[in-house]
Amino acid sequence: MKLKPLYLAVGFIILVLLIAATALFVPHQTNPAFAAAVTFVVAAGKGDDDAAVALLSPQLRAYVAENCPEGSVSACIKAYTPAEWGAFLNAVFRRAQPDGQHAWDVLLLATYAENQGFSGVCIYARSERKQGNTWHITRWAGWMSCDAPNAGLSALINDPTVPNRAP
């Protein structure tokens, strides 16, 4: 019976270590492809064109220059979202699937603020490795409610009718 408090203490320490390890090693922090997708969406959503454009492939930069209001990636993104969603707050990694060694298709989940917040906005970003082992965004789609029938990752990748596809 004297060892029971020791077992509880060891169990508690193990639990704390597991929680800390989970917090430290979330996927977007350990995989640079995922981090690039999150950083791009957050920058574009918050209106930081310089940071967002720095993560785009040359082809996607050309698309933005030709197709987005004033050649602004954040203006493109803002145009996708209804005013009733409110201002962009944040985006987080949800899941990803590899496409070979040098590309990942990444699904992100965004939150917007209207009164207490609107969440459940699904966003797709394709992250590809370029020379120097850095990553850039080559495609995006979505900025739509995750409740929509075609808001899953495979539909966002493959369905040409998904809204807000670039390019």
Image: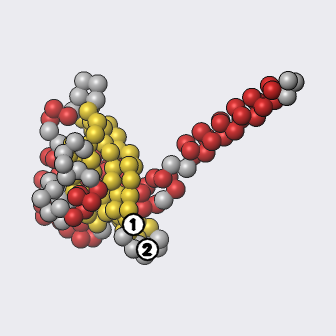
Horizontal side of residue 112 vs 25, given as left or right: left
Q: Residue at x 23, y 28 (%)?
A: 114
- Image-quadrant location for residue 50: bottom left
Q: Which residue is mark 2?
A: 101
- Image coordinates for residue 13, horizontal then vertical, percent: 71, 35
Give the structural element (helix, strand or loop) at label 2. loop
- Image-quadrant location for residue 19: top right
Q: Residue at x 66, y 40 (%)?
A: 17
Name above or below for residue 50 compared with residue 60: above
Instruction: Please identify the quadrant where the C terminus is shown.
Output: bottom left
Horizontal side of residue 127 vs 167, given as left or right: right
Q: Residues within 10 Å of mark 1 (few under 14, many from 20)?
A: some
Q: Amino acid at mark 2?
A: Gln
Q: CA distance from mark 2 to mark 1?
A: 7 Å
Q: Residue at x 21, y 64 (%)?
A: 158
Q: Residue at x 18, y 48 (%)?
A: 149
Q: Residues within 10 Å of mark 2 (few under 14, many from 20)?
A: few
Q: Which residue is mark 1?
A: 98
Residue closest to the eye, 154 or 76: 154
- Image-quadrant location for residue 35: bottom left
Q: Are marks 2 and 1 in contact (CB under 8 Å)?
A: yes
The type of colouring in the image is: secondary structure
- Image coordinates for residue 33, horizontal then vertical, percent: 42, 61
- Image coordinates for residue 29, horizontal then vertical, percent: 50, 52
Residue furthest right in the image: 2
Q: Amino acid at mark 1?
A: Pro
